[in-house]
Image: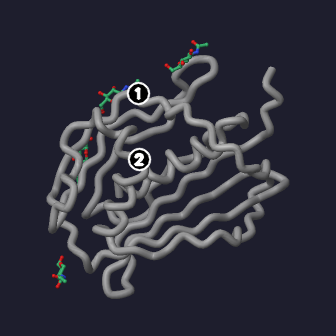
Amino acid sequence: MLIVLFSLLLFVSVTLQLMQIDFERLEQLAGFDIYNSSLRVRKYNRTAVAINGTIELMVPLNESVMVTSDLFHSSRGNQQFNHYPVKFPTQNVYEFLENFYKDYSEYVDDLDNLPAKGECPIKPCKVDILNKPFPAKAVPPFFPSGLWKAQIKLTMNDVEIARFELIIKARQDLGI
Ligand SMILES: *[C@@H]1O[C@H](CO)[C@@H](O)[C@H](O)[C@H]1NC(C)=O
Ligand SMILES: *[C@@H]1O[C@H](CO)[C@@H](O)[C@H](O)[C@H]1NC(C)=O
Ligand SMILES: *[C@@H]1O[C@H](CO)[C@@H](O)[C@H](O)[C@H]1NC(C)=O
Ligand SMILES: *[C@@H]1O[C@H](CO)[C@@H](O)[C@H](O)[C@H]1NC(C)=O
């Protein structure tokens, strides 16, 4: 789902401000009947990465839809991932969206057709994201190098309805 993914991208980009990052993969693994996306991570110029494409929510989502995120780390960058012990709360999509807007609305203000604040149920929508570079906002906590995989699942009554995966490569940027 758009919001989850975008929130994740922002989380990652913000946290990795002082690091060299390369996106390895951004993939939808399940839920093609509810969400359709041409969103890709692409190199924008020599130093910046942007996301570009169109995302489409094809069905309404109500509070029965839960969002779960998990983070995995491969410190050697060899794809052998270990579950990373950071706890993202499981939330329903309304709570998720509310928190997302609270923290990140400044970064998505320019996007048309995003669900309105407090919209209930969340209506089908189609959003163009045109070469959106990551927001340059430094958050200093140390972020270990290696490959990172984030998995985001949407479930309804404990049944998975969509799943997304994002893999990035992180290296310390020595500021050169
Ligand atoms: C998904 O979107 C593409 C265009 O971006 C379109 O060609 C395709 O038919 C859509 N798929 C579904 C299932 O709506
Ligand atoms: C790359 O694009 C970003 C975002 O627009 C910009 O801030 C940066 O100066 C650009 N870098 C180069 C080398 O063109
Ligand atoms: C960016 O996304 C738009 C909308 O989906 C698409 O028309 C365009 O071809 C994409 N540009 C690149 C360079 O991928
Ligand atoms: C949410 O929508 C689904 C259908 O997509 C429906 O089965 C479910 O009962 C709805 N939940 C609530 C709390 O309205």
Amino acid type, label 1: Asn
| Mark-to-mark CA distance, 2 and 1 | 18 Å
Q: Check the image and report above or below for 118 versus 131.
A: below
Give the image location of residue 153, x and y in percent: 44, 69
Mark seen at residue 37: none
Give the image location of residue 11, x and y in percent: 54, 50
* Residue for point 84% across, 54% down: 76
* Residue for point 27% across, 36% down: 111
**Which circle's residue, 2 or 1, is located before the other in the chain?**
2
Q: Residues within 10 Å of mark 1 (few under 14, many from 20)?
A: some
Residue 39 horizontal side relative to residue 57, left or right? right
Looking at the rendering, which quadrant does residue 97 occupy?
bottom left
Check disc 2 and report its element: helix, strand or loop: helix
Looking at the rendering, which quadrant does residue 45 occupy?
top right
- Label 1 belongs to which residue? 131
- Nearer to the camera, 21 or 80: 21
- Label 2 belongs to which residue? 104
Q: Under 8 Å from ligand 3: the CB of mark 1?
A: yes
